[in-house]
Image: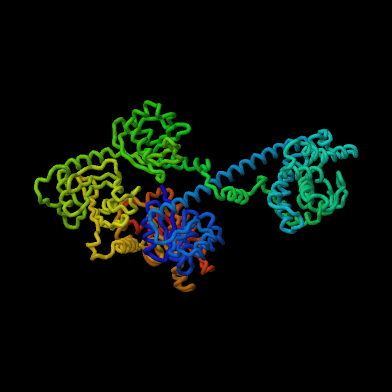
Amino acid sequence: MRRRKLLIADDSEMNRAILANVLDQEFEVIEATNGQEVIIALQSYGTQISALLLDIVMPEMDGFEVLEEMNRRHWIEDIPTIMISAETSNTYIDRAFELGASDYISRPFVPGIVRRRIINTILLHTKKHQLMDVVADWFFRREKSNEVMISILGYALGLRCGEKGMHMSGVSRVTGLLLHCLMKRTNRYALNPDDIDVICMAASLHDIGKLLIPEEILTKPGKLTEEEFAIVKRHTVIGADIISGMSVYQNEKLVKYATMICRWHHERWDGKGYPDGLAGDNIPIAAQVVSVADAYDALTNERSYKEAFSHDTALAMMHNGECGSLNPLLLECMDELSETLRHGVEKKPVGQSAEQVYETVEELYSGQDVIAARMTKQLEEANTKAEFFANLSGELWFEYTAQPSSLHLSKGAVEQTGLPDVIVDPMENEAFLSVFGKKTLALLTEKLQELPTDRTQMEFMAQITLNGKPSQCQTAILVSGKKDSEGHYSSLLGKIVDIDENYKRIQMYDAEAAKPALQKQVLLPILASGESVIRITEKQVGPVLQGYRTMFETVRLVDPEICMQVSTTKESHSVQKNEDCFALWGKSRRCERCISQDAIRMGKIQTKVEPIGNDVYYVFAMPIEIDGMSYSLECVNPIRSEDINGIESEHVLNQLLVRNRQVYMDSATRVYNRRYYDERVRNLSGEYALAMIDIDNFKKINDRFGHTAGDAALYYVAQTIRSMLRSNDALIRYGGDEFFLLFDNMPEQILERKLEELCRAVRKIEVAQYPELKLTISIGGAYASGRISDLIQKADAALYEAKKEKNRAVIF
């Protein structure tokens, strides 16, 4: 599952490292060293950033200046910002909140409390936007229903009057255009946006009085007699009487405007209209605007007694007074709107605009914490995508929903379990209970009851019948929906991995490791020249573990693919069947840098320093093959303060954190450096999607704008590309203005589209300090099997072709 992004802005590397160490299990951490880098990151990532942790004192732009810029660009509404500073003065705190900060945390702080406050701020912000989506959806559906009802009424009335088309709706839309234009030209009429919306809706009722006019007169094809015209003119008074005669809603603004419009929309500026002979601004402005819109729509549409006139002819007739005298200012508005009217008025729902809806929701939300559901459309799209990829992969996926009680299985799960793809009331289904087993379901229930409220994922191992035989399976569960008082969730999404063969092997190794040593002195295996992988048999497992136990405090045999381990202490050996290997570090998810996985993949010894709380550990992982099966032999020792010449342990921890993070980071672009490629990537083997990226005309950029501009170009391009990648993809500055990009499990059919998206994103970059600087990139992509150091040559060849025309992607 894709992790949320968190932006940490502080000019102190140590401060950033401490915060990242607290938060990198829940978030993908992005860093900025000054205010300018914050703005660049916000431009690149946008609302992908879940929160910003912002220091006040920074070079180039301080924290307050960043907040001012975020307000100017309206980012502050979408990205919750938490100030973290050593400044404790009320002046600083008040200033931060005035500029829109969501929280203010003073240093020094307790890591656990900081983590909780950040998560709470993000959750509150998320709930707010969920509420805004739900309320906006409700508003739009309500407005749409109103529009449909009015359109049906207008269409029925039009048929009765012999009119073709949607006259009442057309008048409403032209009324809206005229009112907005009028408000820009003059403040003579005291109308607000709500008045405009209501007048547009009331305009749709302007001819409702014609319901009581004889149909044979309304549909007469020729000219009306004086008596017939007198009857038709009565529709204005009849319409007003219909609306004012209702026993309810008389105080509503819509009813008041509708009454005015029905009665006076045939009054004229010179006083020669009907029914009351009003003149000038004695005619309510709502009725004046509808009279102009009514005249224009009547002229440009076919009637039983005439053909439709062209747009230009209609305007000329209105200016010449052939429709009676009209407000000159409104006729000027018609001229201003001429091109819009010529091409037809876009149909838009009457009522509130999206901006007004969201402003309304902001008011409703103020001071409240309301939980809202996701939009149905978003859920449907997500489900469709998940089902598509699950069926392609053949993996075993399932989704359970409580209301109604049903279980949906992926294609792979159906094939291996023999169950149908949809099971209603699965707990009552004998076939389902037989496959999954009552013990497995009881274990699942127990795990769900124990799941902390701040966690949504869990893994456990249980026995499930696959292909007709019981198999040990690793099951990963994602819970969603609110947990009720009985501990039930509304939805569960799960993935099942068959680990039966590996499980049985580890059980055998554990049994071997539990046997007492034949002698005190244990000989460790010797690696062949140039080898980095230990190759032993099952019978050698116990002695090898015991040998390393004399040198390390914790020794365990790890299969990182299924998170199982055989661990050994001075007293005993045991297989930990139901515990994740990362639980040793007190973590709730796989390690971001799993050196056991790296050791197996690269076939080389891997080491790292792992800080946990106030303690620091040295971790050593060696690839090992047992009867041809690959594992990692993981050995751990604490780093004690006395081992490092008595330096204060907290200071040592902070220095180690900084050192670990700096070793593979390119300082100019904040992406991986060439050392990362040489030590961790180049010798990987397998099937990969990869690309070489080159900034077009980089030398010319340096020559024309200077090397500072070149540095800015490198940074902007790197961060823009990084913002479009997943957390497991690797972007490396390969050298100069060249970057190497390695995708994690990228399907071949998606690669070209992704590379083109990167080209488009870079083209949109704007560097504020260099407005004339236009950036483009060329990309050479490859999808092939082999060693990375060989595959990169294929990507280089593709890049060579791409550079011939520049600003494009080529794939070999």
Q: Tell me what residue is drawn at x 39 percent, y 27 percent.
A: 429
Q: Residue at x 77, y 47 (%)?
A: 290
Which coloring applies here? rainbow
Q: How many marks?
A: 0
Q: Quadrant of residue 386?
A: top left
Work out whether residue 531 or residue 474 is closer to the camera in this orientation and state it: 474
Q: Is residue 790 left or right of residue 48?
A: left
As drawn, the residue found furthest toward the front would be: 90
- Residue 674 seen by the camera: no
Whether 512 is drawn above or below 804: the answer is above
Q: Name the spot of residue 618 as percent of width and height, x first.
A: 25, 57
* Residue 218, horizontal then vertical, whole percent: 82, 36
Spot occupied by residue 33 in the image (x, y as percentages of width and height)? 43, 65
Residue 145 vs residue 730, the one in the foreground? 145
Quarter of the image with the C terminus is: bottom left
Point 30% across, 47% down: residue: 583
From this view, report whether residue 700 is shown above or below residue 507.
below
